[in-house]
Structure formats: structure tokens, C-alpha cells
Image (tube, rainbow, N blue to C red):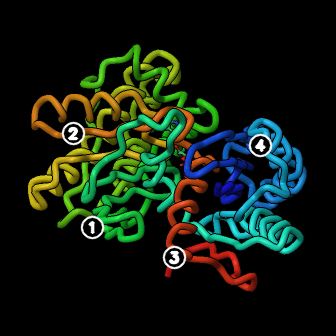
Amino acid sequence: MVYILAIESSCDDTSAAVLRDGLLLSNVTASQAVHEQYGGVVPELASRAHEQNIVPVVDAALKRAGVEKEQLTAIAFTRGPGLMGSLLVGVNFAKGLALALGIPLVEVNHLQGHVLAHFIKEQGDETAPPFPFLCLLVSGGNSQIIKVKAYNDMEIMGQTIDDAAGEAIDKCSKVMGLGYPGGPIIDCLARQGNPDAYQFAKPNIPGYDYSFSGLKTSFLYSLRDWLKDDPDFIEHHKEDLAASLERTVVDILMKKLRMAVKDTGITHVAVAGGVSANNGLRNAFRDHAQRYGWTIYIPKFSYTTDNAAMIGIAGYFKYQDHEFCDINAPAFARIG
Ligand code: KG4
């Protein structure tokens, strides 16, 4: 039997998971509340919190799985991309434990992990997308349309040329003084608002690439004008503002995705990453499935944001291909 311990520490969640022959036995995540007061992730505080969390999180994942560390076959870890200080904690912990146990290391690309979250098995009877499929990967740091040809063969068809979708939502939420992270707050408010109340700028750039900085600017300038007339404008209209902002982001995302489906003829379409928790986006996927005959794959809420379960399944596939990682392989913050 193959037991894999997976470790994820690329941003502000410390997570560990244990898998037996590709089946998920445990997935434990410690989130870091320390960043809330700053309205964003503070890298130095994130690495310190990882340092505090990593041992108890790994310990809890092993205990919950009922697995002793001596039973482990390999350790999978997120090597990048992400915050360097955060990555270093997970990478070095994984290396130290692998060395002590005399077992191999498997490196996982965080973004590929998000895509492969659709292959996480808890019962063993989950439906995973067939290859090739398209995946819309939307998080705080990335917005990409990926053609997934195999577990280890992914082509980025388009991506943001500036802000990511989650980043744009978070920043607009911040200027409204709504708190951090903005995504879940906007999602909640949007449910009570009118998505057609306000219009914000939509980008017009070629190909499958995205851009969200124009929307951010348009949101900011509109808000400034409205606040001149009514200093309580945000308080009075926050639901409509949230709903209109969410609608604009979802429209921008879906327009390019429709183009990619049309041009490739691939109708199996998945969504992944933190923003895939958004109800407006999930509904847009369901609507497209009905309207255009797509077969859609929407992850469980717990596998949308950063988690080690997705690193574990990605690591398991690599383990099967005997793709091991050198003990000297450094963490990387960015791709390329
Ligand atoms: O994938 P993720 O956990 O982290 C990285 O980007 O590394 O994604 C976090 C992003 C944040 O921008 C957060 O605001 C957004 O996902 N998010 C949401 C929702 N839940 C999280 N955005 C919209 N609606 C949500 N329900």
C-alpha cells in the first residue's frame, strides 16, 4: 500500500493530508487569522504562523488518518509558486521528515494541485473529469484557462495580464471597508442585491487572456463620485454594489471560457481555486451546463481554497510515474 503525506504552505493556510493508494484519509488545515487586521496577507507573519502550525497540523493529519509516520511511503509538498517565506517552511519540513524516514520526496506545483483537486477521492466513487477537459483556475493570485490533457500535461490557454479575479474582488471590498478576505463577504452580500444595479468597465483584450485592473479602477472612480453626493452611499447600497461587482467578474470570466469551449470543442469544463467557492460563479457554471450542454465539475467547498488533499492526489499521480524530487530542489515563488 502507498501512503502519502502531503504538505501545503504556499500562502496563509498550513495544511497536511494523508492518502492511502490515492484515497484521502485525512486533510487538516490551520488558517491564519493574524492577517485580518492588516486587510491582506503579511508574508513575514505568514511564515511565522506556518512555523507554529506545521508540527501540530501534520501530527493531527497522521492521527486522524490512523497512520504512523513510519508507515509513510513518500512525502508530497508544494514547491511553488507562492510566498517564498511560507513555502520554505513546508519545503524544509518535508525534506527533513523525508530524510529522517528515508523515503522519497515528490514536488507539486500549487496550480496543478488546484486543477487536480477534481481527482480527490474520499469514497472512491466520485466522478472525475475525463481528459481532455478545460479548467478555469481562479484564485487570489491567478486567473487562468487551462487545457488539461493529462495529469501531467496542462496547457495554459489564457491568463490574467494584471490582477487576478480574487484580487480584484478583495481590493474592491477593501475600498468599501468591508473586511478581509473580501471574496466570501462580497459573495454573502451579493445574494441580497441586484446584479443589474450598476455597470462597471469590462475589458476588451484579444485571445483568452483576462484583465481585471480596469474593472478595479472603474469601481473605484464610480464609488468616489457616488460618495460625493451621499457620504453613506456604501452603507445604503452595499448589497447592490456587491452583486453588480460579482456579476461583472463572473461575466468577464465566463465570456473567455465560452470562447475556449467553442474553439476547442471541449465541453467538459471544471472550475478550481479560491474564487470557485463563489455562488455567482457556481450558478453561472450550472447555467452554462444547461444552456450549452457543458458537463461541469465544481469542487467541494473545502477543496476550493488552499488544501493539502489536492497536493496529495497530485503527488500520488507523480509517485506512480516515479517522478521524484531531489533533496536539493529549492522552493520557487514564481513560474518562469
Ligand atoms: O486559492 P486561494 O485560497 O488562494 C490563493 O490565491 O492562493 O484563493 C483565495 C481567493 C481570495 O481572493 C478570496 O477572496 C477568494 O479566493 N474567495 C472568494 C470566495 N471565497 C474565497 N471569492 C469570491 N467568492 C467566494 N465565496
Q: Nearer the viewer, residue 36 or 148?
A: 148
Towards the viewer: 264 or 333:
264
Q: Is residue 198 above or below residue 61?
A: above
- Residue 216 is left or right of residue 319, and the answer is left
User: Do the residues under discs 1 and 2 have CB atoms within 8 angstroms?
Assistant: no
Residue pictured at 50% horizontal, 41% vertical: 121
> Where does residue 269 sit, x and y in percent of width and height?
26, 47
Q: Which mark is residue 167?
A: none
Question: Residue 335 got which mark?
Answer: 3
Residue at x-position 17% and y-position 40%: 294
| Residue 85 versus residue 311 in the image, above or below | below
Q: As shown in the figure, which amino acid type bears the numbered disc 3?
A: Ile
Give the alpha-carbon distance from disc 3 to disc 2, as whole Å: 30 Å
Kindly tell me whether residue 4 is visible in this rendering.
yes
Query: Which residue carries the number 4 mark?
Result: 61
Q: In this view, does 67 lie above or below 122?
A: below
Kindly identify the residue that appears in the image at 76 percent across and 41 percent down. Answer: 30
Q: Which amino acid does label 2 sit on?
A: Thr
Q: Nearer the viewer, mark 4 or mark 2?
A: 4
Density class for disc 3 (Cα within 10 Å; few <14, some 14-19, many ≥20) is few
* Residue annotated with mark 1: 157
For the residue pair 199 and 221, the one nearer the viewer reads as: 199
Which of discs 3 and 2 lies nearer the camera? The answer is 2
* Mark 1 nearby-residue class (10 Å; few <14, some 14–19, many ≥20): some
Horizontal side, residue 133 vs residue 151: left or right: left
N-terminal of the pair, mark 3 or mark 1, is 1
Distance, label 4 to label 2, CA atoms, is 33 Å
| Residue for badge 2 | 295
